[in-house]
Image (spheres, rainbow, N blue to C red):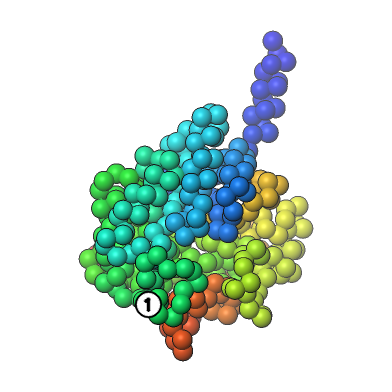
Amino acid sequence: GNKDVTAEMAAASAAPAPSKTVKLNTGYEMPLIGLGTWNSPAEEVKRAVDVALRSGYRHIDTAQGYGNEEPIGEALAACIKAGVVTRDEVFVTTKLWVGNYAEEHALPSVRESVKKLGLEYVDLVLLHWPFRLEHGKPFPPADEDKLGYKPEDVLTAWRALEKAKEEGIVRSIGVSNFTASKMAALVAGGGSAPSVNQVEMHPCLAQQGLVDYCAAVGAVVTAYSPLGSPGRPDRVRSEGDPVPMAEDVVKAAAAAHGKSPAQVLIRWCIQRGVVCIPKSVTPARIESNGAVWDFELSADEMAAISALDMGSKGRLLKGDLFAKAGQDIAALWDGEPESVIAAPAKA
């Protein structure tokens, strides 16, 4: 009778709104909000993926270097089996580790990742950093294991991702921690245009120049550490690091909308058309991080939050673990975000 209909309507309104998407240059849709899993231990990450998928997330981000592809695959399989999601509703990203860039390791390790995740294909594979390390060495690396940035090494690894895409085990391919200059060098060297560039991004490192560059070359930007990476390990913490969630303009916008500072930072990100992958293993935070579809920041609020930009001083993950002794950190980033190359003119 009528009671059932009312109950059904109540359940439907309580169901979380699934993430909206952005279209990649391959034609596939990528959800604007995903679950980040860096530093998420195996047992906790299974629960995190389960909570995320049940609360409306449709995008999970991992990497070979995180060591948690298998538990994530198990959680995915369990949710698919339980009817929470179908495989084609979930967008899964992983990353080729920098110790696997040599030709003999690259493609086999991508195949291995797909297997560990228990999937027929992954939606997106990224080159994790533009800097190569010796194969099979511990991280953080010793000085002699740092092979630095060489365009030909990047291209070799990229060719493996292109092959994986041809094989059908990967649908889209992209890069991570690349400057506009390094993206341009990859394409100039004969590589296909990346679908995505995943970089650190939050209001204190807004990188508008890179966002504009990527838009011009048809790449979607994904923001990692969108909340300012509050849980990052001590080895990547420095004096004077910004704390975006503690900024007055962020707290003011949160109060004005009845939202948390984290929700405001995620909303700022997606309103710029940037994919956002906040990391958490706390169920309540995972849920609230995804619940950002019912409010909108005004143009004034967006501008005030964007004004927190500190350029390179806002960078939390400085990449210094890849620098050789005495190497200039600014050089790792080609002088970005202070100066970004212009995008090639459209033909």
Q: Residue at x 52, y 45 (%)?
A: 71
Q: How far from the left and from the top, in percent, is residue 273?
A: 50, 57
- Locate the C terminus and report the quarter of the image it occupies: bottom left
- 76 or 145, which is in the foreground? 145
Q: Amino acid at mark 1?
A: Gly
Residue topped by disc 1: 148
Does residue 15 show up?
Answer: yes
Q: Residue at x 70, y 60 (%)?
A: 261
Q: Residue at x 47, y 68 (%)?
A: 138
Placement of 146 over or under 346, stated as above or below: below
4 left or right of 27 in image: right
Q: How far from the left and from the top, in percent, is residue 253?
A: 71, 61
Q: Residue at x 54, y 50 (%)?
A: 34
Disc 1 secondary structure class: strand
Q: Within 10 angstroms of label 1, few (less than 14), some, or many (20 or more) residues? A: some
331 left or right of 74 in image: left
- Locate the N terminus and report the quarter of the image it occupies: top right
